[in-house]
Amino acid sequence: MLNTRMVRQSLLGLSLALAGLSAGAGSIAGSKHDFSAVTGTNGQICIACHAPHNTAAGLTALWNHALSAATYTMYNSAFSSTMNGTVDAQPGATSKLCLSCHDGTVAVNSFGGVTGTVAIAAASNLGTSLTNDHPISVVYDAALVTADGALFPITNAANVGTGGTKSRTGTISSNLLFNTKVECASCHDVHNTFTVPVATSGTGTVSNKLVKISMVGSALCITCHDK
């Protein structure tokens, strides 16, 4: 017998995605990463990235999406005379998962061993040159704080989310860094768990872009940057 509650929930997630609505924090249904309307997902939200069975050996998080084979040009001191951080030659594993869609070389619906044809929207396509984006795969530690002189210590508070059960208190180190490094998911909350809402600031709207800390007043930036 069908579980009618589950059916209703699935239909709701699909209808939200098709309508282009934005879900509140805590729900991936209706968020920018709700893939239930993507060709080949058959209405499933998560399958484009994760699968419960038969994923490629050795990949984290039961990863189901095709990985990019691109070589990236990283943002580093060659592009900024004020940068003191040490950047890896290529993105770390966490950021590579994001780039498997966002570098534009792999179709959004290339998953489960199938090569897809749906390209990511131009506004979300970072390309393979990351020289005009915030540096990723860069070590953020006490040595960098000292060398830079304009970064907060990694022990400083960096609380994420919207409050209540959809928030997490912690530090820059515990909530924003991955193995001591800044990665894509340092700022972005891919599952919409702790995403802050879109807000109006001044005369315009500040888009959330699935960020963990509000962009209003550049709060996200000045969590780490002492300006």
Image (cartoon, helix red, strand yellow):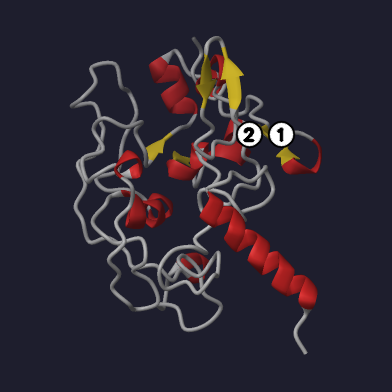
Residue 41 rendering spot, x and y as whole percentages: 47, 71
In the rendered view, does 174 fall on the left or right side of 99? right
For image coordinates 47% across by 84% down, the residue present is 54
For image coordinates 63% across by 46% down, the residue present is 23
Name the image quarter holding residue 9.
Answer: bottom right
Residue type (three-letter) at the residue carrying disc 2: Val
Name the image quarter holding residue 130.
Answer: top left
For image coordinates 34% across by 57% down, the residue present is 100
Q: How crowded is mark 2: few (under 14 residues within 10 Å), some or many (20 or more)?
A: many
Residue 223 rendering spot, x and y as whole percentages: 57, 22
Res. 183 visible in picture: no
Q: In this view, does 225 lie above or below 125?
A: above
For image coordinates 39% across by 17% down, the residue present is 148
How many marks the image carries: the answer is: 2
Residue 189 rendering spot, x and y as whole percentages: 55, 44
Asked which secondary structure carries label 1, the reply is loop
Q: Nearer the viewer, residue 219 or 101?
A: 101
- Which quadrant holds the N terminus? bottom right
Q: Nearer the viewer, residue 15 or 52?
A: 15
In the rendered view, does 133 fall on the left or right side of 194? left
Residue 50 disc label = none
- Residues marked 2 and 1 touching at CB (< 8 Å): yes
Res. 144 visible in picture: yes
Residue 22 rendering spot, x and y as whole percentages: 59, 43
Q: Pick whichever of labels 2 and 1 is earlier in the sequence.
A: 1
Q: Name the residue under label 2.
A: 196
Residue type (three-letter) at the residue carrying disc 1: Thr
Between the C-alphas of marks 2 and 1, the distance is: 6 Å
Q: In this view, does 93 lie above or below 39?
A: above
Q: In this view, does 199 lie above or below 12?
A: above
Q: Name the residue under label 1.
A: 162
